[in-house]
Image (spheres, helix red, strand yellow):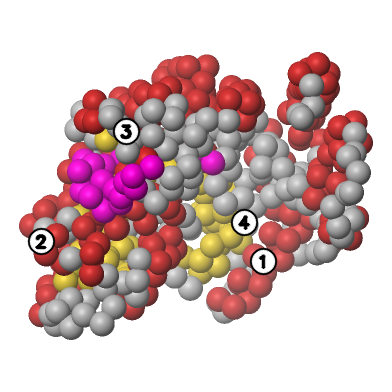
Amino acid sequence: MDISPDEYRRHAHRLADWIATYLRDVGDYDVLSHVKPGSIRAQLPKAPPAAAESLDDIIADLDRVVLPGATHWNHPGFLAYFANTASVPGILGEMITAALNLNGMLWRTSPVATELEQVVTDWLRQLFGMGDRWFGMITDTASISTMYVLAAARERDPALGIRQRGMAGRADLPRLRVYCSEHAHSSVDKAVMTLGMGLENVVHIACDADFRMKPEMLARAILADRAQGFRPLAAVATAGTTGMTSIDPIDDIATICQRESLWLHVDGAYGGSAMAVPEMRALFAGLDRADSLVVNPHKWLFTPMDCSVLFTRQPKVLRRAFSLVPEYLTTADGDDVLNYMDYGVQLGRRFRALKLWMVIRAFGADGIAERIRHHCQLARTFADWVRANGDGWSVCAPVPFSTVCFRHVPENETDEAEIAAHNAAIMARVNESGDIFISHTKLGDQYVLRVAIGNLRTTEATLERAWTLLREAVP
C-alpha cells in the first residue's frame, strides 16, 4: 500500500517550506555546480535499499546530495545558454500534475487533459497575435517538435509512399533535401538523421552580415538540387538562432517555399515568445504563411521543464504521418473528440497543459509581455555598457531579443586562436566566481561570449555584477 495521506500532508508541508526557502535564497548558492565527475555517484549506495527508508531521511538527502550537484537554472546569475524560470505557478502546476497522474493519450482517458491543451495552445496563439488557422499541441522539446513536422513534410506527398514502404532500397525515391541556415539549431540535423533521410541531405544556407539566412542562396540551392534530381522537401527558418538570436527573413523564405512547394517550419523555440510583446511582432513578418512553428514556454514563458508547443496549419497531414490505432485503443467517440496520440509517436502523454495554463493565468498577457520587454531592455543596457567601454570590448551581433554576443580583444592581437583562448579564459574566471554563469558560441571564426537573460529573478544589479567580473577577468 502507498504511504498514507496524513504522512503525505506532513512531508508536503515540509517540502513546501523547503521549496519556498530555496526560491528565496537561490541567489546565495554558487550558480554552477563545482562537484567533480563521479563524486555524486560515489556518495550513493551501489544497490537499492532492501528495507524501506523514511521520507525524513530521503528529504534530508536533498541538501546532502541533490543541491551540491545542481547547476541552478533558477539562479539570477544564470546567464548561459537560454536562461529560464521555474515560476511559482508553474511549480504548483507540476505538483498537481504529479498528483493527478493523468494520461492524455485519448480524449476518453482524461478529457480535461485534451481539452485544456486545446484551450491553452489557442490562448498562446492569441497571445502571439497569430491567425486563427493554427492547430496547437504540446510536446516535450523543440527537437521532438521539429522531427514531427519534418515527418509531416515527408508525408504531405502521399506519392512518396514512405509511411507504408519506408525509404530503404528504393530506387524510385529521390534524395529528400531539407534547408536551414548555417546557424540553425542542431535539432534540424538530428531530425533529418533520425528520420532516415541522412545528414548529407541537410543543406546549410549561407547568412548575411546579421547572421540571417540569405533567401537568394536558398533559391539557388533548391534550383541546383532539382537539377541533380533531388527532391526539395522543407525549409526551416529560425526566429532567434541559438548562437546569436538572429531572425531569418521569414516572409521572403515563405515566398520561395510556396513557389517551390516546400514545407516551411519556423523554429521560434526561444525567440517566438517575444511575439507576446505586440511591438515585437513585426520581427516575425510572414509567420502566418508558414506550415508550422515551435515555441518553448520552458525557455522564456516561465514554465518549468519540459513544455514545447508545436503549431501547424496542416494538422491533417501531421495526423496522417502518425495516426495508427490498434483495436485496444478504439473508442466510440468518433470525430467529436481529438485524440492527441494521433499526432505524434508518444502514446502516453503528460498533463503539461495544466502548468502552462496556470502560468498564463497567474501573469496574464500584459504581465508576460512586460516581463519579456524588461528582459530585452536589460540586454540592450548590457550591450550599451560593452560598447561604451572601448577597452578592447565589442558587441559582435545584433541584439533583437535578450541575448548579447560580445568579446574582448587584447590590443594589437589579430590571431583568432589566441583571441579565442583569451575569451575562454575570461569565461572560466567568471564562471568560477559562483555568482555568474555565462556560455559562448562561434560567429564564423570568431569565438564570442554570450549573456542570455530570461530568468524572472535577474535584475540590472545581476548584470552589473557580471560586467564587473568580466572586466576583472581580463589579464
Give the magenta part as a residue range: 306-328
Residue 129 visible? The answer is no
As drawn, the label of residue 35 is none
Q: Report the label total.
A: 4
The answer to whether residue 268 is above or below residue 36 is: above
Q: Amino acid at mark 2?
A: Glu
Residue 27 lies, in percent from the top left, at 76, 35
Q: Nearer the viewer, mark 4 or mark 3?
A: 3
Cα distance between the residues tagged 4 and 3: 50 Å
Cα distance between the residues tagged 1 and 3: 58 Å
How many neighbours does mark 1 have within 10 angstroms: few (below 14), some (14-19), or many (20 or more)?
Answer: some
Residue bearing the label numbered 1: 424
Q: Residue at x 16, y 67 (%)?
A: 160
Residue 165, quarter of the rendered image: bottom left
Residue bearing the label numbered 2: 260
Q: Nearer the viewer, mark 3 or mark 2?
A: 3
292 horizontally vs 29: left or right: left
Q: Quadrant location of the N terminus?
A: top right
Dot 4: element: strand
User: Contact (CB < 8 A) between labels 4 and 3?
Assistant: no
Residue bearing the label numbered 3: 331
Q: Which of the marked residues, 4 or 1, is nearer the chain's N terminus?
A: 1
380 horizontally vs 429: left or right: left
The answer to whether residue 462 is above or below residue 12 is: below
Dot 3: element: loop
Q: Which of the marked residues, 2 or 4, is nearer the chain's N terminus?
A: 2
